[in-house]
Image (cartoon, helix red, strand yellow):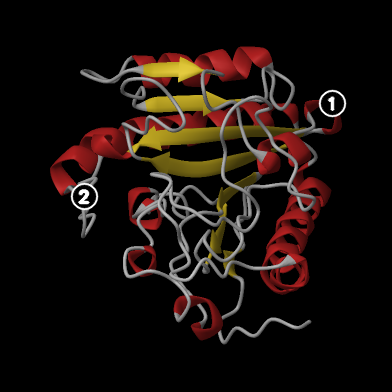
Amino acid sequence: MSFSTDTPAFTLHRGSRPLLVSMPHVGTHLPATVSQRLTAEARTVPDTDWHLERLYDFARELGASVLVATHSRYVVDLNRPPDNANLYPGQDTTGLCPVDTFDKTPLYADGNGPDDAEIAARRDAIWRPYHNALAEELARLRAAHGTIALWDAHSIRSVLPRFFDGKLPDFNLGTANGASCDAALAEQLLDIASAVPGHTAVLNGRFKGGYITRQYGQPEQGVHAVQLELAQSAYMSETYPFAYDEALASGLQPSLRAMLATLLEFVEGKG
């Protein structure tokens, strides 16, 4: 089975310094073959990591490469393993090709979700090109700089009983329990996040890093990977139409920039 889409799987800006910022869940595109089967709610793609390109608009100024997904995670989730293995055993998660929203409402109006053949076709059409680009850009940066950093940028609604109790901390840093990044560097990043007035932060809490962090973070090989899951209440409205809040966002951006600058300082010091 083939899968048709009229939009490339990603956009890539190639930077000059040893940092790649990945944004796998910002995409909103729904190919017609998917969109026409979805509920009206699902077509608004509410579980998108909204506005991260705008929030991280300074990344290019820092010299970072920026890889941005175009398709909605409802088509295929780029931060899941290709075999759809559960990254958090014993906890509820959404799959490689989700069939419900974060609130557990069905995505497909008639229950007609993708079968195995369609899942494989979506993976080949969108998941593989994104990950090929990610791996190739990391390899380019490694060849040029030796030691490099990968920042996997995410955001999520601050209250989601399906996935966690209560309200999520504002900054949720994940390093696969220390396996994907130098421990002292991770603590530096946590210190920056923890110092933001009126905000909360945690390292390797509920969100420890998804497939991208775990797959590509290899500090012993010179690749230090960190996932940041931001609570959306910290920079935007969490209800439709999910508006960006300039006042809130501007309060976060200096700290986000400081975290990326700290990553760069660390890896450039390693050479």
Q: Out of 123 and 200, give the one closest to the viewer.
A: 123
Q: Is residue 82 above or below residue 226?
A: below
Q: Residue at x 51, y 25 (%)?
A: 173
Q: Residue furthest front?
A: 110
In depth, the one of 217 and 113 nearer the eye is: 113
Residue 257 location, quadrant:
top left
Q: Which mark is residue 43?
A: none
SS type, badge 2 = loop
Quadrant of the image for the N terminus? bottom right
Residue type beneath disc 1: Glu
* Residue at the spot of label 1: 220
Q: Can you tell which mark lies on residue 239?
A: 2
Toward the viewer: 202 or 19?
202
> What amino acid does circle 2 point to?
Thr
Marks 2 and 1: in contact by CB < 8 Å?
no
Which residue is rendered at x = 63% and y = 37% of the image?
210
Q: Residues within 10 Å of mark 1 (few under 14, many from 20)?
A: few
Is 184 placed left or right of 117 in the picture? Answer: left
